[in-house]
Amino acid sequence: MTKSLSKSFKKALWVYHCNSGSCNGCDIEIIAALCPRYDVERFGIKLVGTPRHADVLLVTGPVTRQLVDKVKRVYEQMPDPKAVICVGNCGNTGDVFYESYNLVGPIDQIIPVDVYVIGCPPRPENIINGVIKAWMKLETLEAKK
Amino acid sequence: MSQTIKTTFQLPIGPIHPALKEPVAFEFEIDGEQIIDVNVTLGHVHRAIEWAARKRNPIQVLYLAERICGICSYCHPMAFALAVERIADVEVPEHAQFLRVIHAEIERMCSHILWAGVAAHEIGFDSVLFLTWEIREKLLDLTEYLVGNRVTKAITMIGGVRRDITPEMYPKIKETLQYLKDSFEKLRRVYLEDKTFKMRTKGCGILTKEEALKLVAAGPTTRASGVKKDVRVDQSYFAYCDLDIDYMTPDILTGEVNGDVYDRIIVRLLEVKQSISLIEQCLEQMPPGPIVSEPKIAKLLAKLKKVDGEGIGRMEAPRGEVFHYVKLNANEYIYAWKVRAPTYNNIMPWIPMLKNQQIADIPIVAASTDPCMSCTNRIIMIEDKKTFILGKEELHQRSIQKTRRLHL
């Protein structure tokens, strides 16, 4: 882990956050990860305003029917190599909303997911751990090129 | 030569857009730089929560209610529990009433301090945003120590709470409260004495008392206009009737009520101070006893299965009054459930607040009611029957520019 991390520091990782109908719980934990206690910007991880600049897509929320096409399009706009992190239980399994008529279901049925971060909401450490795993995956993808 | 015909363009924005924190879609009709028409599509976050409740028993609905909003994850299930307790005549033990007050006040402080950071961000003070979130982390540590989680607390139970606060836990609570008292002085100096903050917020976004009453504003927004309205005092619930609590209006500190953004900051800061005092009073007065009236969940559910009737639960959430209506019809599941969150009340007051304001003041005025994110992102201004729409990013830029101009 430490070995691959030091290798990864060559590149700053830019993250795009896409809310697909979440309750704000995961979203405030993502902001908490950016704030002084966890401060991920020291690793070069930062939120960007467009998927076209991003290496990693953070998806929160259970994907409501109105947002399926939009999530797909955000994914398609990202340049390769890319990684998708699904943050929160409702994106992974549906959680308490699992039987709702307005959900299209877990995110991995819509776009390929690389890292699953579970928790409702996951702790900031957990989210950072997920981003680092995505980082390692991106490194292997780059090496294969 | 054929004649050129001038037409308008269609410009769709959202539902996923960097300026939008929560999904909401807009379709503009634009003519050059000017926006002629706008159509808003809501409902992207519709997860059918009230419908799903009809297939679940009251205990399961507690967890569903917790996930309505991640920031108010205590007051929604608690208001639901209040409604069910009223229908089923469940007596809550006195010890649990005090515990409920402690958790509600911790959530209020978290929410107000989060809001203070957002307000600072809106006028371009990102260093203050980081300062307030640092303080908030201490409160989240305390929350985690008391309930076991940072955001979704899962502490509510019909007829009480799920975890006790024992005297061994008091030192840790008192330590955090002392830290908050020390940082409170720092926050007060930044927010109330800083020259730039004063210049940006005084006389800005005024909501008069008459309009606050007419538009039924809720929570700190209405109290900043001098309306003495607070569910904790008006219709006392939990153990608030045993505690020293009063309406927090800005005249306590300044002797006058203006109803501007500055007053809303004063009210929220005073409420943080009040919450600290309320928790201290609870720790002093809390009698020993059970934490829940019926510890066996199966027994409680069997009782609720036989109940027929409807009830409401009202509670003072950090943003204002939250209202839950529940109907049970002697069945295993909930028959009907309706939720009204305080943001509904606080949207209409934006209109008088924003009239005759500078465009650069819009973000701080809109944020001053502490709305849920999807409401804050976009402002529609109607001038001379033409509608102009400004995105959040642009508004934020204009706001920062105004702060810079003041420094010169």
Image (cartoon, coloured by chain):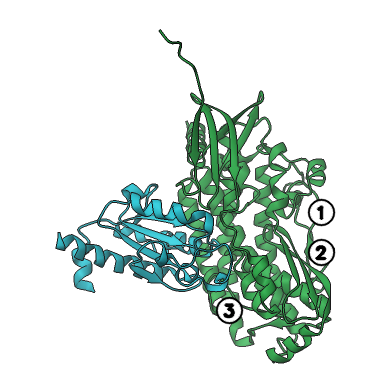
Categorize mark 2 by other alpha carbons within 10 Å: few (<14), some (14-19), many (20+).
Answer: some
The residue located at (55%, 48%) in the rendering is B24
Q: Is residue B93 visible?
A: no
In the rendering, at what x and y percent does residue B12 appear?
49, 39
SS under mark 3 = helix
Image quadrant occupied by the N terminus of chain A: bottom left
For the residues labelled 1 and 2, say whether their Cβ atoms are less than 8 Å apart: yes
For the residues labelled 1 and 3, say whether their Cβ atoms are less than 8 Å apart: no
SS under mark 1 = loop
Chain of the residue that carries numbered disc 1 in the rendered image: B
Image quadrant occupied by the C terminus of chain A: bottom left
Q: Amino acid at mark 2?
A: Val
Give the alpha-carbon distance from disc 1 to disc 3, as whole Å.
Answer: 32 Å
Give the colour in which the image draws chain B. Answer: green
Give the alpha-carbon distance from disc 3 to disc 2, as whole Å.
Answer: 26 Å
Q: Is residue B273 above or below residue B15?
A: below
Chain of the residue that carries numbered disc 2 in the rendered image: B
The answer to which of B323 and B53 lies nearer the viewer is: B53
For the residues labelled 3 and 2, say whether their Cβ atoms are less than 8 Å apart: no
Q: Is residue B46 left or right of residue B18?
A: right
State which chain is coloured cyan.
Answer: A
Q: Is residue B315 visible?
A: yes
Camera-near label (1 vs 3) is 3
Q: Are marks 3 and 2 on the same chain?
A: yes
Which residue is tagged 1? B228
Q: Earlier in the sequence, mark 1 or mark 2?
A: 1
The answer to which of B255 and B391 lies nearer the viewer is: B391
The answer to which of A106 and B118 lies nearer the viewer is: A106
Which residue is tagged 3? B147
Disc marking residue B233: 2
